[in-house]
Image (cartoon, rainbow, N blue to C red):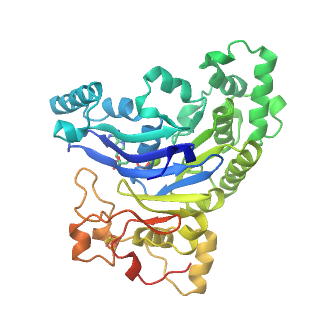
Amino acid sequence: MPDAKDYLLLVEDLHAYYTSKRGLVRAVEDVTFGVKRGESVGLFGESGAGKTSVALAVLGLFERLAMFGSDAGSTETKRLWALRRQAREQGLTSKDMGEDLPGVEGKVWFDGRDLMELDEEELRKLRGKEIAYVPQTTMASLNPYMTIEYQTAEGLLAHEEYDDLSEDQVAAMVLESLDLVELADPTRRRRLKPKEFAMGEDQRVLIAMALITRPRLLIADEPTTALDMAVRHKIMRVLSAVREKTGMATLIISNDAGLIAEVTDRVVVMSAGRVMESADVTTIFKRPGHPFTRAFLLSNPTMEVLRRIRERGLRIRGIPGRPPDMTSPPPGCPFHPRCEYATEMCRDTLPEYREVEDGHWVMCHRYEELPPLEL
Ligand SMILES: Nc1ncnc2c1ncn2[C@@H]1O[C@H](COP(=O)(O)OP(=O)(O)OP(=O)(O)O)[C@@H](O)[C@H]1O
Ligand code: SF4
Ligand SMILES: [Mg+2]
C-alpha cells in the first residue's frame, strides 16, 4: 500500500459513477495513483476513459456536476442521489447500502490530508489555492468582456488571505503569472481582452490564472486539444518552464501522446474507467507492457514513436472495435473485446493491477507471455 506521506496527491481505490437514463455510468473504477511533490504525472488514455472524471473527483466537484447532469429529474435518479446523501451522512459506502450508488468513493489524500473528509468550504479554499485546475473546455472559461489582468487577478479574490494586498501588489502578481506562461509584452497586453489575443494565447492566460496563487499542484485537462502544431509546442514549453521555475507538481490529462511524452515524468494509462498500466514515461513510450497501451500508442504515435515504428517495419493501426459502454462494462478484463491476446480467463476474470517490475504496474493476466515490444 502506498503511504500518503510520500505523495503530494494520492488517489486510492477511487470510484466515480454518474447517473443516466440507461443506468449508472461507471466512469471511474478502482483508480489508484500518486503524484509526488514537484513531479509531473500524465493521465493518458482514450476519449471516455474517465480522465476528466478523475480530476473532478479529486477536486470535489464530481458530485455537484453529476447530480445536476443528465436524467437529473427522473424518480430513479433522485432516489439514487438521496441514498448517496444518506450513505454519506452515516459514513457508509455503496457496499454497506447493498446497492451501487452514484458519486465518489475511495480516498484522495493531498499533502497527507484526506480530502474526502473536508466540507465544501474547506474544499473551496483548497481549490484554486493549493490545487489549481485548468478545465478541458477552454473557450468557455475566459470572459470576453474583461481584461486579462482582471481575470487573472480574480483567482485571488476568492481567498480572503489576499484581501489586504494593495493594487500594486496584485498587479505585480498578475504580471509574474503572465510572465511565467511567457505571454509576450505582458505589461502592455494585460489590459487587453481575450478577443485581442491570438489562438492559443487564451490557453496560456488560463494557465496564468491558475498559477496566480502559486498552487502546489496544477491539474491541466487537455491543455493542447484543438490547437495547431505550433501553438501546441508553445503550450508544452510553457508547462515545462512553469515546472522548472516554480517546482510545482502537475497532473496533465490528455490523449495527446506527444504532450504526455514531452512534459511528464510518469504516466498513468486509463481505459474504461480503470488504470491499465503506469510507469515512468520512458518505459511507457519505449516498451509499453499492457496490450491497451501498445494498441493506443500504435494508433496514436508521437513523431518519435512514428519514426521507430517505420524503422522496425511495424504497422500503424487503430484499435479495433469501440471503447466499452460504461453503463454495462464487459465482465473480466475491460479490454478483452478489443484485445488480440484475450483468452477465456480474460473474458471471465478481472486482472489484478500488479507491480511487474520496480515502479511499473500492469493490469493484465498475460503480461509475462506477451511478445516483447520495443518502440
Ligand atoms: N455528466 C455526465 N453524465 C453521464 N455520463 C457522463 C457524464 N460526463 C461524462 N460521462 C461519461 O463518463 C465516462 C468518462 O467520461 P470522462 O469525460 O471522464 O472521460 P475522458 O477520459 O475525460 O474523455 P475525453 O478524452 O473525451 O475528455 C464516459 O463514458 C462519458 O460518456
Ligand atoms: S488481461 Fe487478457 S484481454 Fe486483458 S489486456 Fe491482458 S491479454 Fe488482453
Ligand atoms: Mg476529458
Left or right, residue 40 beside residue 365: right
Rendered view: 113 above or below 274: above
Rendered view: 207 above or below 294: above
Residue 46 spot, x, y in % from top left: 43, 58
Rendered view: 276 above or below 32: below
Q: How many labels were placed on the picture?
A: 0
Q: Quadrant of residue 21?
A: top left
Residue 61 spot, x, y in % from top left: 43, 32
Q: Tell me what residue is drawn at x 23 percent, y 26 percent.
A: 86
Q: Tell me what residue is drawn at x 54 percent, y 59 percent.
A: 267
Q: Tell me what residue is drawn at x 56 percent, y 80 percent.
A: 309
Q: Quadrant of residue 349?
A: bottom left
Q: Residue 362 versus residue 200: which sits nearer the camera?
A: 362
Left or right, residue 206 beside residue 369: right
Q: Residue 190 versus residue 54: which sits nearer the camera?
A: 54
Residue 273 spot, x, y in % from top left: 36, 53
Q: Quadrant of residue 336?
A: bottom left
Instruction: Work out whether residue 61 can be spotted.
Output: no
Q: Tell me what residue is drawn at x 29 percent, y 65 percent.
A: 333
Instruction: Work out whether residue 8 can be spotted.
Output: yes
Residue 147 spot, x, y in % from top left: 70, 24
Q: Residue 217 versus residue 69: which sits nearer the camera?
A: 217
Quadrant (top left/top right/bottom left/bottom right) for the C terminus: bottom right
Ligand 2 quarter of the rendering: bottom left
